Amino acid sequence: MTTASLPPDLQAAIVDLDGTMVDTLGDFSAALDRMLADLALPPVPAAAVVDMVGKGSEHLIRSTLARVHADPALYDAAWASYQRHYPAVNGRHSQVYPGVPEGLRALQARGLALACLTNKPTAFARALLRDKGLDGFFSQVFGGDAFARKKPDPLPLLATCQALGSAPARTLMLGDSSNDAQAARAAGCPVVLVTYGYNHGQPVRAVDADGYVDALPQVAVLLPARL
């Protein structure tokens, strides 16, 4: 855990999903392998998938096709196949990271309203949260298809703050990648990153953030006493 300087008057927290609350690499790999099989293309190893997740399904599919040197013109067929297969594997090959429910309860105990904001499609995100018993923590859930632009654009954070009724400067972003940090900086939100997530295969501590935690319950410890 790295000490952070966070506002004492936080109202809310926005929490990323993949790589922050749930390790979904197995779900992504299973859906992509089924998609590639439909297109008579070779599978990709999970070690390669981890570098491609986090920027939305469109980016993941295009990156996967490029990885296997497929014709980019196959994108529409790949998209349709992925959308068909993902609901069948969603949550089947994934695990909640240790301490996540405890961390969310600790944030609620500090009086913070919680929203989940992910680049995963909203329907997939809601289904995964239900499957893992995490849906009850969040008053708002927004996916990558909820707004005109995705993280790292600040629009999703600003719109989520509006839905929560919280000021950006008083809304903490919790994520695992540069996408989350860049969006938070641009939106004017403080940001703390977990050290165990994906971050496109890059060291997360190299990302500009207000703090880093090795487990979600540590976030509550970083929060200053209320004034």
Image: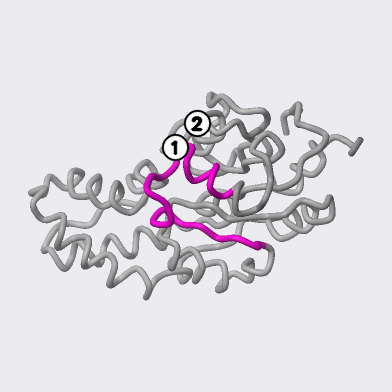
Q: Main secondary structure of the magenta part?
A: loop
Label 2: state its secondary structure: helix
Q: Which residues are magenta?
A: 138-160
Location of residue 27 in the rendering, given as x and y in whole percent from the top left corner: 41, 63
Under mark 2, the amino acid is Gln
Quarter placement of the C terminus: top right
**Residue 39, placed above or below residue 63:** below
| Residue 117 lies in the magenta stretch | no
**Residue annotated with mark 1:** 152
| Residue 141 lies in the magenta stretch | yes
* Residue 26 relative to residue 128: left or right: left
**Residue 62, placed above or below residue 92:** above
State the residue in front, 145 or 39: 145
* Residue 141 relative to residue 39: left or right: right
In this picture the colour scheme is: one colour
Q: What residue lies at 41% left-to-right and 45% top-to-bottom?
A: 150
Location of residue 24 in the rendering, given as x and y in whole percent from the top left corner: 47, 58
Q: What residue lies at 48% left-to-right and 63% top-to-bottom?
A: 125
Q: What residue lies at 73% left-to-right and 34% top-to-bottom?
A: 1
- For disc 1, the neighbor class at 10 Å (few under 14, some 14 to 19, many from 20) is many
